[in-house]
Image (cartoon, rainbow, N blue to C red):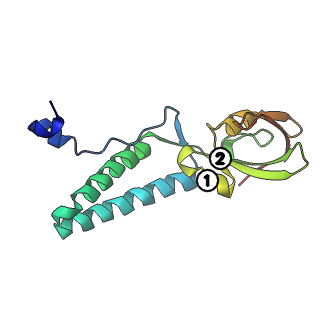
Amino acid sequence: MSRAFVKESDEDLASDELPERPQSPYPNYVTPAGLARLQVQYSELLDRRAQLVAADDPLLKQQVRQVQRDLRYFQRRLESAILVEVSSQPRDEVHFGAMVDVGDENGQRLTFSIVGEDEADVGAGKISWASPLGKAMIGSKVGDNVVWKRPAGDTGLEILAIHYA
């Protein structure tokens, strides 16, 4: 029988809820700046929800659901955040919070910062500690060569310098 002729149950109406945003299986390491950004995002979502609810417009229900879903996501991210004090990292090895200068096989010099997953922004040179490149560099020292496993093919990188803010 065609679905068009079947009466929807109350359970079907409840399926209007949005699926939850997936949470990472990795520990939620954050820098102080990353933690502050999570807190700002959560606060902005609280404000947005208050605005939407105050509008009391039935047409905004979907937006309210999206904001509530995002609030649940960021609340879990804040609850699971593990603040890493960068000042306690060894200065001669790449660890969480490091800024790393690398040279590729073509002699090009690149700089990456190892940050938490929520802080990652490849365009700004911020990579997650759990990314293939982040994992390849963690624990290396100046002069070490690491292999960056990429879908486009593996690339060798030499660690040229390690800095911590």
Which comes before the other along the chain, label 2 or label 1?
1
- The numbered mark at residue 25 is none
Front-lying residue, 7 or 24: 7
Front-lying residue, 106 or 135: 106
Q: What element carries label 1?
A: loop
Residue at 50% of width from left, 57% of height from top? 37
Residue at 69% of width from left, 36% of height from top? 151
Amino acid residing under circle 1 = Asp
Q: Which residue lies furthest to the front in this view?
A: 1
Residue underneath mark 1: 121
**Residue 7, horizontal then vertical, whole percent:** 8, 38
Where 33 sits versus 98, above or below? below
Residue underneath mark 2: 127
- Label 1 neighbour load within 10 Å: few <14, some 14-19, many 20+: few
Q: Is residue 95 left or right of residue 77?
A: right
Q: Is residue 90 left or right of residue 3?
A: right
Is mark 2 in CB contact (under 8 Å) with mark 1? Answer: no
- Label 2 neighbour load within 10 Å: few <14, some 14-19, many 20+: many
**Residue 117, horizontal then vertical, whole percent:** 56, 44
Q: What element carries label 2?
A: strand
Q: In this view, does 163 lie to the left or right of 114?
A: right
Residue at 48% of width from left, 36% of height from top? 24
Amino acid residing under circle 2 = Ile
Where 48 sits versus 144, above or below? below
Location of residue 123 (image quadrant): bottom right
Location of residue 124 (image quadrant): bottom right
Q: In this view, does 82 lie to the left or right of 108?
A: left
**Residue 120, horizontal then vertical, whole percent:** 59, 49
